[in-house]
């Protein structure tokens, strides 16, 4: 069962017979799950610390890093995608504005 997510670009069915899942499994050693709150925090962090607008799907990897779920260092996080509604981005950043002084 799918639920709404800020990382909607990472959700959805994979076409039957697609090579996506086998290909991913051949290169990854694991998958890290992050919460919606962690994704929100990453969106706000990217904005306040770096002036970058990123969508939820892009923020998922950054969320894993910021939450301490990525143990190996150094780590590289590739952020791609800025397709987020401006009002959603503003609301998220306003919720996290108190933390922004720490970044």
Image: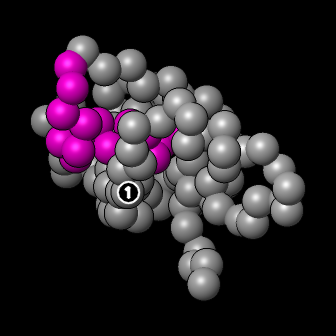
The x and y percentages for residue 71 are: 18, 33
Q: Residue at x 75, y 66 (%)?
A: 13
Quadrant of residue 82 in the image? top right
Residue at point 76%, 59% (across, down): 14
**Whether residue 42 can be seen here:** no
Q: 49 or 21, which lies in front?
A: 21
Residue located at (47% from left, 43% from top): 59
* Quadrant where the image shows the C terminus: top left
- Nearer to us in this view, 91 or 14: 14
Q: Quadrant of residue 2?
A: bottom right
Secondary structure at badge 1 equals loop
Q: Position of residue 81 (x, y in %)?
A: 65, 35
> Dot 1: within a 10 Å radius of its alpha carbon, few (fewer than 14), some, or many (20 or more) residues?
few
Q: Is residue 70 left or right of residue 54?
A: left
Q: How many marks?
A: 1
Pointer 1: what residue? 33
The magenta stretch spans which residues? 58-73
């Amino acid at each position: 069962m799918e639920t709404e997510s800020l990382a909607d670009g990472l959700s959805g069915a994979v076409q039957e017979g697609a090579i996506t899942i086998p290909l991913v499994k051949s290169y990854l050693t694991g998958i890290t799950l992050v919460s919606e709150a962690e994704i929100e925090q990453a969106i706000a962090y990217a904005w306040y610390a770096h002036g970058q607008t990123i969508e939820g799907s892009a923020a998922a990897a950054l969320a894993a890093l910021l939450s301490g779920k990525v143990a190996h260092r150094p780590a590289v996080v590739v952020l791609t995608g800025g397709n987020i509604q401006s009002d959603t981005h503003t609301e998220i950043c306003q919720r996290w504005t108190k933390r922004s002084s720490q970044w």
